[in-house]
Amino acid sequence: MAKISFASGAQAFARFSSYFTTRDFIFHDGRDLRRFSVGGRAQAMMAGIAAVTLCFSAYGVAQAAVGAVALSGVVGTPLSPEAKVAQMQLRVAAMQADVEKIRAVAAAHAARVEQRQAIITAVVSGKADQRALAIVPQPIDPKADALAADVVAPLKQVEQHQVATVAKVRKVAELRYAKAAAKVRSLGLAPERFDAAVPAMGGPYEAANGAEAAADIRADMQFRSLFMTWKKLDNLEQGTIAIPSVQPVERLAFTSNFGIRSDPFRGTAAFHAGVDIPGPLGTPVYATADGIVDRAERAGGYGNMVEINHGKGIQTRYGHLSKILVAPFTRVHRGQLIALMGSTGRSTGPHLHYEVRIDGAAVNPAPFLQNADYLLAAQDRSVRTIPVVVGGAAD
């Protein structure tokens, strides 16, 4: 029976070992970011050593207690074999319980390290592990934490490096956000347009007991703050996908700009809601950002027109098309072929009428085309003779 009990303990330890896998982490060594690896085998070995130590310690204490009682003469009858086996089973059960506590504490530390690592990696590399970011680390019992001290020591070391990294990583995130926000503002857009709602939090106040618990709370607050900074940055950078930022045609030139101009048909002052880009009949026309096709149809002075909703209140329109190649309510991607240039509608010749609209109001598309080779287009106009063709919907 004793052998069976020891086998049960070995099986429990084997199951325990399977919880440990190799983990790679990033930490700041005082000068730059470095990678740190904790092997799963090493974690399991340390756990095994700790468990065996606990077992022998418990066994030694029990034997000393039995010896002391025997010397005192209190024990008159030696324990039966069944009683000895029962005692051994109790000790094995206690060892298994300790191993389970160690496993739970190690798993909690590993989860915390993995979540913090995911936040740091998301900021530094821009690659977000959504599964790791969604981890909710479990609270750690101080007594169990002390019991597992030898096993979790490497993980606690990584945690310390992570905490030391927070300030530097947050500065990286704030700098990236400032640059992205400046770019968005240069297009006449407010960065706040891309902010997501702040998640709600609450609950009764309970003070943290102990210096280590208080330190954990402070570290959690630092990482929560870093996560919110990264989330704000990620929302802005992801939101820029909705901002038109490539040329709608391969060769860019302008025969009519945004704003007040002389109407090509009436000769009177009129508002032009976009820019006119000339080209041969059938020139490919591309989506300038990801989005959903709102309209792909004949539309008055626009002639054949495609309207794409890019989200965040941003739309683009492509008018005077000879052929529409996309259907309404379909998703398109930046750079995708959506139509061919033409001269349908209110037009004097083949060209593309291109608009950018924010919250329904037309804005100057020129800043959105600056990521394209805007200066090269201007140089081309200065050395080439381009037939002037204009158009646009009557406004």
Image: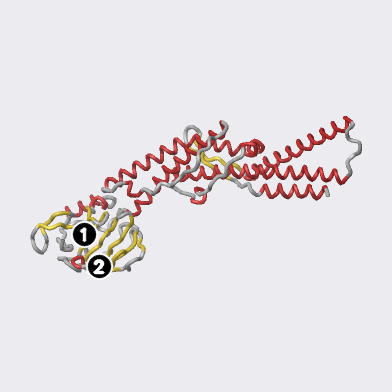
Query: What residue is disc 2 on?
Result: 282
Residue 293 x %, y %: 32, 64
Please state which amino acid type lies under the numbered disc 2.
Gly
Comes first in the chain, label 2 or label 1: 1
Residue 385 position by quadrant: bottom left
Residue 60 located left or right of residue 115: right
Residue 246 x %, y %: 30, 55
Please state which amino acid type lies under the numbered disc 1.
Ile
Residues 149 and 204: in front is 204
Quarter of the image where the C terminus is located: bottom left
**Label 2 crowd bin: few (<14), some (14–19), many (20+), radius 10 Å:** some
Residue at x 52%, y 37% (from the top left corner) = 217
Q: CA gap, disc 2 to disc 1?
A: 13 Å
Q: Residue extending furthest top?
A: 72
Residue 371 located left or right of residue 36: left
Q: Residue extending furthest left?
A: 267
Residue 67 position by quadrant: top right
Residue at x 71%, y 48% (from the top left corner) = 12
Above or below for 243 versus 105: below
Q: Residue extending furthest front?
A: 204
Query: What residue is disc 1 on?
Result: 277
